[in-house]
Image (cartoon, rainbow, N blue to C red):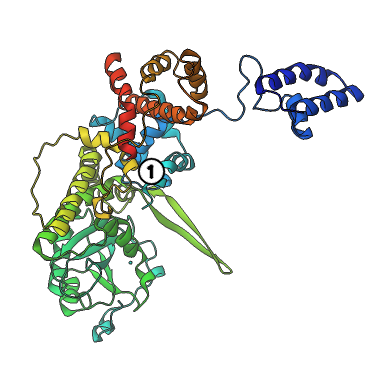
Amino acid sequence: MSKIAGAVRRELVRVLRERYQTSAGEERKMLLEELVRLSGYHRKYAITVLNGRSRRLPATGGGRKRGRPCVYDEAVRQAIIVLWEASDRVCGKRLKAAFPLLVPALEAHGHLHLDTAIREKVLGASAASIDRLLKPARQVTTPRRKRLATALRKRVPVRTFSDWNDPLPGCMEADLVVHCGDTVAGRFVHTLTLTDIASGWTECVPLLVRGCAQVTEAIEALRPLMPFPLRALDTDNGSEFLNDTLIEYCHERNIEFTRSRPYRKNDQAWVEQKNGAVVRRLVGYRRLEGWPAAEALSRLYSASRLFVNFFQPSFKLAAKIRVGAHVRKRYHPPQTPCQRLLASDAIPAEIKAKLNLSSSQLDPLRLLEDIRRMQSHLVALVDQGEAYTPSPANRDLTGFLASLSSAWRTGEARPTHRAKPKAVRHWRSRIDPFESTWPQMLIWLQESPDQTGHELFDRLRQTYPGLHQEGQLRTLQRRVKDWRALMARRLVFGLQESSATQTSVAIALPSLIESQSS
């Protein structure tokens, strides 16, 4: 027997469903066999549709939607993407902890205008929900010597990972990061990194020459910038640290000086983590040589130290338990280094007041823009040999703010990690099938924005018979999805525009989508 049409098959199910649900025994079996024979359904699927449990055959007037309702819509996702970009793409748990800092700061400086309902949903989203909403953006963005011991080791005591015992702020680990590229031959710039054990406060400074005098001068220059006195310093066994100059410097200033065990990098786990999470994340792996590169790197660290220490929460290990071969770690809730210092009893009240004042005056978006700008200058200096040109003091951040909502589409946002760009494609590969009917579609969407792409396509085929084929449904669904994303971004930023302006932008949406996809 030939198969019957879909509409006839659905009507047959509707006719037999009521009789099937009220009958029993042989009559119920006879109705089931009749539906299987006429429709070609599998017997089990026929039982499902006759019992009314199939989503593919909705009742007249639209079936009841099943499943949990959607809590976080496109507007919430766009707001979280902007905040994720503004925090320099931290993980969901750290971003959740950063929301109470970032949202008021961006709103206070006029960079973000969230509707009350959207703001409550953003602040109330869990870390798992944040990661789930950021998953599409992260999928697009999914983008490395041991030193000999010297005779001075006997003068410096050893401190291991477990010997800190919850120290006061000011006990720091120090390490050098090399910016040598693919070879260690010749001279290149180094970064001296200091990390506080108690709070995670991190300071970085570039060194043009790797020597004991330069390390000592850099530590002396960093001490006034830190909100606590330098109480202890722990280094590795390199000759730039284990020397008479640094040992005498620490002894004269009553700074406890210790070293890690040779070839045990985990003894300096705190600073090693910051070498990757801060230095490599900001600078990348290019080779930096000469005074211009060191100067550009210094300007980059001047902006990043405030952003990292005031607006980027980090984890801190609370306990570690070994069960057989398995190690279980428990962490404190993510906090910024500034928050940990404000909660510490060892920090004087006047220092806390200064930290609170600095935190209220800092603009995280401006700091992030400074970081991106200096990263671009550093890449231009290394790759093209261009000199650094300072920008005007009062910069307009409107363009940078608008780019945060769509930065994930272009992949890597950090210029120091960005691959060589491909040639921009400026032509279409085929004719736009909805070029003539898209203005009418916009009118229907403005009248009823909750229409599905399937409903719009059926209505379009009824209005313009013979113009569109069934295979063009998916193209229209993607077009409607992009239109809703554009409207959601306008809702997040609170843009008040006339209906004529919105219509003109929406009509130009196909060309915008084509340019972004190319």
**As drawn, is 338 to the left or to the right of 19?**
left
Q: Position of residue 139 (x, y in %)?
A: 42, 46
Quarter placement of the N terminus: top right
Give how far across and how far down residue 116 sits, in percent.
38, 23
- Give the side of residue 235 with respect to residue 131, left or right: left
Of the pair 250 and 413, the residue shown nearer to us: 413
Q: Foreground residue, 277 or 252?
A: 277
Quarter of the picture holding the C terminus: top left
> What is the quadrant of residue 98 in the picture?
top left
Residue 494: quadrant of the picture: top left
Q: Residue furthest bottom?
A: 151
Q: Is residue 18 above or below residue 71?
A: above
Residue 451 can be seen in this image: no
Along the line of sight, the residue nearer the viewer: 344 or 499: 499
| Badge 1 amino acid | Leu
SS at mark 1 in the image: helix
Residue at figure coordinates x 36%, y 17% from the top left? 439
Residue at horizontal 31 percent and vertical 51 percent from the top? 337
Mark 1 packing: few (<14 Cα in 10 Å), some, or many (20+)?
A: many
The image shows residue 360 at horizontal and vertical percentages of 23, 38
> In this orientation, does residue 347 appear?
yes
Count of labels in the image: 1
Identify the image quadrant of residue 366: top left
Residue 328 vertical placement versus 488 (above, below):
below
Q: Which residue is mark 1?
A: 95
Q: Position of residue 490 (x, y in %)?
A: 32, 25
The residue sitting at the right extreme is 26
Q: What residue is at 36 percent from the left and 53 percent from the top?
A: 143
Which residue does the image show at 35% across and 27% down from the upper left? 486
